């Protein structure tokens, strides 16, 4: 059995949301909108309650295997402390920006760790769970 990573973790279940656990802060529109230890954020692009998942992925048949198809997180300038929070910044009409320590755990157990990156929330990136810029041409709209 694989050891669960410590710190802030984002699980990527097939066809489902981004499931974050740890010290999670969420910002949108330049304001902090949440400070939590457990939250599911939409990555299918269809939730009526973005950035949160509202279960619509089941209705739209969001088809994603939950594996790392491309992209990555990169180290920040400073080494994070083990208990630092991760701030998820909801870019207007764009991805979820990672600012702080996070380990992404794919459905096949592959992990990617870092402190900076962009996670897809429009549902059409070809490098899910990371953003490839596809939202720009898709008309994706979210605060
Ligand atoms: S991932 Fe659940 S509503 Fe989009």
Image (cartoon, grey):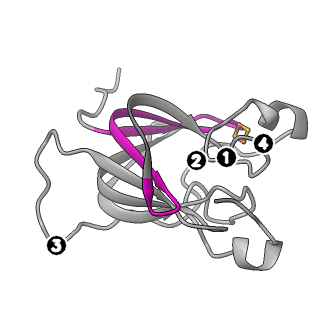
Q: CA distance from mark 3 to mark 2?
A: 27 Å
Residue drawn at (65%, 43%) of the image: 42
Q: How many marks?
A: 4
Which residues make up the magenta segment? 8-31
Label 4 residue SS: loop
Q: Is mark 2 within 8 Å of ligand 1?
A: no
Q: Marks 4 and 3: CB-CB under 8 Å? A: no
Q: Quadrant of the C terminus?
A: bottom right
Q: Marks 4 and 1: CB-CB under 8 Å? A: yes
Q: CA distance from mark 2 to mark 4?
A: 25 Å
Residue 3: x percent and y percent? 28, 26
Which comes before the other along the chain, label 3 or label 2? Answer: 2
Q: Which mark is residue 50?
A: 1
Q: Position of 118 compared to 24: left or right?
A: right
Residue 137: x percent and y percent? 79, 79
Q: Which residue is mark 4?
A: 48
Dividing the picture into quadrants, the one containing residue 98 is bottom left
Work out whether 29 lies above or below 33: below
Q: CA distance from mark 4 to mark 3?
A: 36 Å
Q: Which mark is residue 77?
A: 3
Q: Is mark 1 within 8 Å of ligand 1?
A: no
Query: How would you rate the neighbour count of disc 3 (Cα within 10 Å): few for under 14, some for 14-19, many for 20 or more?
Result: few
Which comes before the other along the chain, label 4 or label 3? Answer: 4
Which comes before the other along the chain, label 1 or label 3? Answer: 1
Label 1 residue SS: loop
Dividing the picture into quadrants, the one containing residue 10 is top left
Q: Which mark is residue 67?
A: 2
């Amino acid at each position: 059995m694989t050891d669960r990573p410590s710190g802030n973790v984002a699980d990527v279940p097939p066809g489902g949301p981004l499931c974050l656990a740890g010290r999670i802060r969420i910002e949108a529109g330049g304001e902090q909108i949440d400070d939590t230890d457990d939250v599911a954020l939409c990555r299918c692009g269809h939730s009526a309650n973005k950035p949160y998942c509202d279960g619509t992925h089941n209705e739209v048949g969001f088809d994603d295997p939950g594996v790392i198809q491309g992209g990555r997180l990169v180290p920040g300038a400073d080494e994070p402390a083990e208990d630092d929070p991760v701030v998820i910044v909801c870019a207007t009409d764009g991805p979820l920006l990672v600012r702080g320590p996070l380990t992404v755990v794919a459905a096949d157990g592959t992990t990617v760790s870092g402190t900076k990156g962009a996670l897809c929330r429009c549902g059409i990136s070809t490098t899910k769970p990371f953003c490839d810029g596809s939202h720009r041409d898709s008309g994706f709209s979210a605060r």
